[in-house]
Image (tube, rainbow, N blue to C red):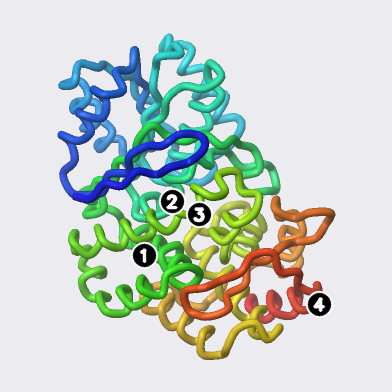
């Protein structure tokens, strides 16, 4: 087990990573001493949420469970409204707590509900997917999707604790486990060359879901994100580096009505960004090949989903980080280092996106 403290202006909190963390969960809930709790989960991991409910019951806290359908479409204003009404029916007061048990969709939805219910109550994240463990469960971004834009409606709301129990990954379906490596490779290419080397060296153990190696991978990703969030909690500058691959990735998700998985979309977005960087002379062909090789090695092949290029290009223009109609791209420069804030000629974006989708 490893533990780190994420420091942010909105509050510091522990992130605990290990296997078999029921005792840590009970201790964490005991320290928070909430007056009530609602566990938010999805239909895929409801049994795991039931285990969590039993664990915190032993800490002296009863909880209600709210289950949403699995999938990105549960990140909607309609589902948020239903969850808020559930919190009201459950009589959760300002001393209460929302506990998210699930992947990124559950965490984003539950965190946003915690941010706005009673003008903000405590929130604990128990991510059950590798994707959520390495990325969305830390940093304080919460929210739901708009009609055409990913994560367009939300709030910055830091959790009170995050507990990543690697035991939950043993039953994770192979496609979901594979998709998480898009975000892991993102950290490696954009921020941490040592992580790239670890991924290259430990492919077999990670394919077998070796707990010791997974602990190291999750720890390195969370540490990289924590350092950025501490400097730029509200995403006004340096934190944009975490969006490497997400400009075209989020656009692909929106263009397909969120039917493509987040991991597959981010892998697509990273390939697009690297090829734009190469076309602009910002990175080498070797870097593009290294990134392609690593994504493919972890089950994220270059085949793009069928979607009209015009829809993806239109969604890129709606990127929520655009300023005065200008999209700021995160561009890779060399392995382990990317830069934020690059303006890219629309003709280059168009050419690369069309080729990537052909």
- Res. 178 mark: 1
What residue is at 31 percent from the left and 47 percent from the top?
4
Which of the marked residues, 4 or 2, is nearer the chain's N terminus?
A: 2
Asked which quadrant contains residue 44, the reply is: top left
What residue is at 32 percent from the left and 74 percent from the top?
199
**Mark 4 against mark 2, which lies toward the viewer?**
2
Question: Could you tell me how far apart the alpha carbons at marks 4 and 2 are, in whole angstroms?
Answer: 36 Å
Which of the marked residues, 3 or 1, is nearer the chain's N terminus?
A: 1
Question: Could you tell me how far apart the alpha carbons at marks 4 and 3 are, in whole angstroms?
Answer: 32 Å
Q: Looking at the image, which is closer to me, 246 or 227? A: 227
How crowded pointer 1 is (Cα within 10 Å; few <14, some 14-19, many 20+) is rated as some
Residue 180 lies, with reference to residue 123, above or below; the image says: below
Residue denoted by label 3: 228
Which residue is situated farthest in the bottom direction here? 285
* Marks 3,1: beta carbons within 8 A: no
Asked which quadrant contains residue 222, the reply is: bottom left
Which of the marked residues, 1 or 4, is nearer the chain's N terminus?
A: 1
Numbered disc 4: secondary structure: helix
What residue is at 54 percent from the left and 63 percent from the top?
265
**Mark 1 against mark 4, which lies toward the viewer?**
4
Asked which quadrant contains residue 256, the reply is: bottom right
Which of the marked residues, 4 or 3, is nearer the chain's N terminus?
A: 3
Question: Could you tell me how far apart the alpha carbons at marks 1 and 4 are, in whole angstroms?
Answer: 33 Å
How crowded pointer 2 is (Cα within 10 Å; few <14, some 14-19, many 20+) is rated as many
Which of the marked residues, 2 or 1, is nearer the chain's N terminus?
A: 1
Question: Could you tell me how far apart the alpha carbons at marks 2 and 3 are, in whole angstroms?
Answer: 5 Å
- Res. 347 mark: 4
Numbered disc 1: secondary structure: helix
Query: Where is residue 317 shown, x and y percent of the image?
Result: 77, 59
Query: Where is residue 343 shown, x and y percent of the image?
Result: 76, 69
How crowded pointer 3 is (Cα within 10 Å; few <14, some 14-19, many 20+) is rated as some
């Amino acid at each position: 087990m490893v533990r780190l403290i994420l420091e942010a202006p909105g509050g510091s909190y522990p992130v605990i990573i290990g296997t078999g963390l029921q005792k840590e969960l009970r201790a964490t809930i005991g320290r928070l001493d909430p007056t009530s709790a609602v566990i938010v989960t999805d239909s895929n991991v409801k049994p795991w949420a039931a285990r969590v409910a039993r664990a915190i019951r032993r800490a002296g806290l009863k909880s209600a469970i709210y289950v949403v359908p699995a999938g990105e479409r549960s990140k909607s204003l309609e589902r948020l409204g239903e969850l808020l009404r559930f919190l009201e029916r459950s009589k959760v007061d300002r001393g209460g707590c929302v506990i998210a048990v699930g992947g990124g969709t559950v965490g984003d939805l539950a965190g946003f509900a915690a941010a706005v219910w009673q003008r903000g109550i405590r929130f604990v994240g128990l991510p059950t997917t590798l994707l959520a463990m390495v990325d969305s469960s830390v940093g304080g971004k919460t929210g739901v999707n708009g009609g055409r834009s990913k994560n367009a409606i939300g709030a910055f709301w830091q959790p009170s604790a995050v507990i990543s129990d690697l035991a939950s990954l043993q039953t994770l379906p192979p496609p979901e486990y594979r998709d998480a490596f898009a975000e892991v490779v993102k950290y490696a290419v954009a921020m941490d060359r040592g992580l790239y080397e670890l991924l290259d060296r430990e492919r077999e153990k990670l394919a077998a879901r070796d707990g010791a190696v997974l602990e190291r991978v999750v720890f390195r990703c969370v540490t990289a994100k924590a350092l950025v969030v501490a400097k730029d909690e509200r995403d006004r500058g340096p934190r944009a580096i975490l969006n490497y691959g997400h400009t075209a990735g989020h656009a692909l998700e929106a263009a397909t009505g969120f039917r493509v998985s987040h991991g597959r979309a981010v892998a697509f977005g990273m390939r697009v960004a690297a090829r734009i960087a190469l076309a602009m002379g910002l990175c080498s062909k070797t870097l593009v090949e290294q990134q392609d090789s690593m994504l493919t090695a972890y089950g994220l092949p270059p085949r793009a989903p069928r979607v009209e290029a015009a829809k993806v290009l239109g969604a890129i223009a709606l990127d929520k980080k655009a300023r005065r109609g200008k999209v700021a791209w995160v561009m890779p420069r060399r392995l382990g280092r990317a830069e934020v804030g690059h303006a890219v000629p629309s003709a280059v974006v168009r050419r690369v996106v069309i080729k990537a989708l052909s």
